[in-house]
Structure formats: C-alpha cells, structure tokens
Image (cartoon, helix red, strand yellow):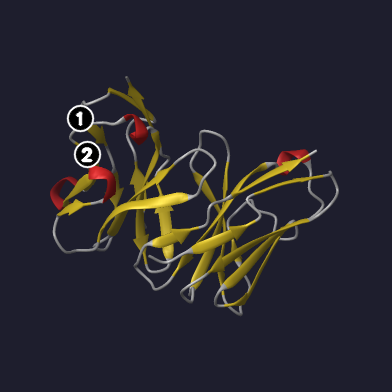
Amino acid sequence: GAVVSQHPSWVICKSGTSVKIECRSLDFQATTMFWYRQFPKQSLMLMATSNEGSKATYEQGVEKDKFLINHASLTLSTLTVTSAHPEDSSFYICSALRDTNTEAFFGQGTRLTVV
Amino acid sequence: AQSVTQLGSHVSVSEGALVLLRCNYSSSVPPYLFWYVQYPNQGLQLLLKYTSAATLVKGINGFEAEFKKSETSFHLTKPSAHMSDAAEYFCAVTSGNQFYFGTGTSLTVIP
C-alpha cells in the first residue's frame, strides 16, 4: 500500500519558537494533503486542506498565520507551528489522497509538546 | 453535505465476544466509506473500505463491515474480540477530495 511518512514523530520545543512538521508521500503523488489535530481521547480535527502549488484552505477557527502550510510538491507538505505556546501541544497527523474518492493514507503522527 | 455518526464513544467487550461498532452516514451522493483503527500515539491504519462494489466488505484482522443503504449504516463487526483489538476506531466518508470522520469509538477488550 501507499506510504506516508511524517517527521518528526515527536518534538519538544520552548514556548515562542517555531516547529516544522513534514509529511511526505513516499511512493505516490498526492493530489491533496490534509492536516489534522487530535486532542487526547478525541477524534481528528481537520485543520486545513492543501493542494500542490496553491494556498491551503483552512477550517474555521484555525489561524492560518500561526499554522503555516506549504505544499511545494506533489510528495511533500509541511506544517509550521509559529511562535508555539503550551496550548499548541497536541498530536498532529497528516494524510494524503492519491486520487479523489479513494482512501486517505495517514502519517504516523507528530506529538508536539511546548514547554 | 456529508457527515458520519458513531454511536457509542466507548465500547467494552469480553475477549472472544462479538465486536460491533456502529456507524451511520448521511450523504447526498453514493458514498465511499471507510473504517480506520488508531493505536495510541500512532497514525490511522485502514481496516476496510466500501467503494460501491460488494456490500459486505472484509478487512484486515478479521474485521468486516456491511453497507446498508436502506439504513444508511456501515457497522463494523468482528466475531471474536482479541486483546490486540483494543484501540480507537474511526468511521469516515469521502466525497471528492474531502474526508469526514466520525468522533471515534474506543474499544476495550476485557480478558
């Protein structure tokens, strides 16, 4: 099956710094990539949808200036949490679609802890 | 508009007992439906998917789900629960390039 690699799997950073999370589709070109945030014992909350070469579409309530998404190629999307604060600590997951109306392939997630 | 409802945020079963996790969807067009499993601190793994072929779909780890259009349901079942099945399960529906997830069901397996 298709593989999506997310890096890093966990990161600890100081409050006020920025953190970049990478999401790569290893063996296919992703038409669309998604970024989710997941709080403990809760479902995935869609943050934004990104298509290669265009601006990401953010869900309501998600600060686009704080969560910067870059989708520079068909195999790579990055999420940068800028000026991170403890309340940004969460589990972030990316997923990629190979084609429309097909399954999404998920990265293994990134546990972000801001101290 | 698409949406997915998972009834029961927590389900507990005894080891060896039947597992039934419920999922209902609303869709204005024929849906593609999925079940994913998530183990702690990991991403989501596809269990099975329905893509308008056979209504009874068999997935990995002995799970299966049946698409019932009349009930707008896609419940996940497994005849005999194993301890390793303890995890979070998510039902999802897709239309075009959008994915909609249910709120998840946490499955506990009691030895």
Q: Distance between the residues labelled 2 and 1?
A: 7 Å
The C terminus of chain A, quarter of image: top right
Q: Name the residue under label 2.
A: B77
- Which mark is first along the chain, 1 or 2? 1
Q: Where's residue A95, x and y in %?
A: 50, 60
Residue at the location (79% across, 43% down)? A85
Same chain for marks 2 and 1? Answer: yes
Q: Where's residue A66, x and y in %?
A: 75, 56
Residue at the location (20% across, 32% down)? B80
Residue at the location (36% across, 60% down)? B94
Location of residue A91 by image quarter:
top right
Per the rendering, the mark at residue A84 is none
Amino acid identity at mark 2? Thr
Amino acid identity at mark 1? Leu
Give the chain of mark 2: B
Q: Name the residue under label 1.
A: B18
Q: Where's residue A78, x and y in %?
A: 66, 65
Label count reads 2
For mark 2, give the secondary structure.
strand
Q: Which one is in front, B2 or A109?
A: A109
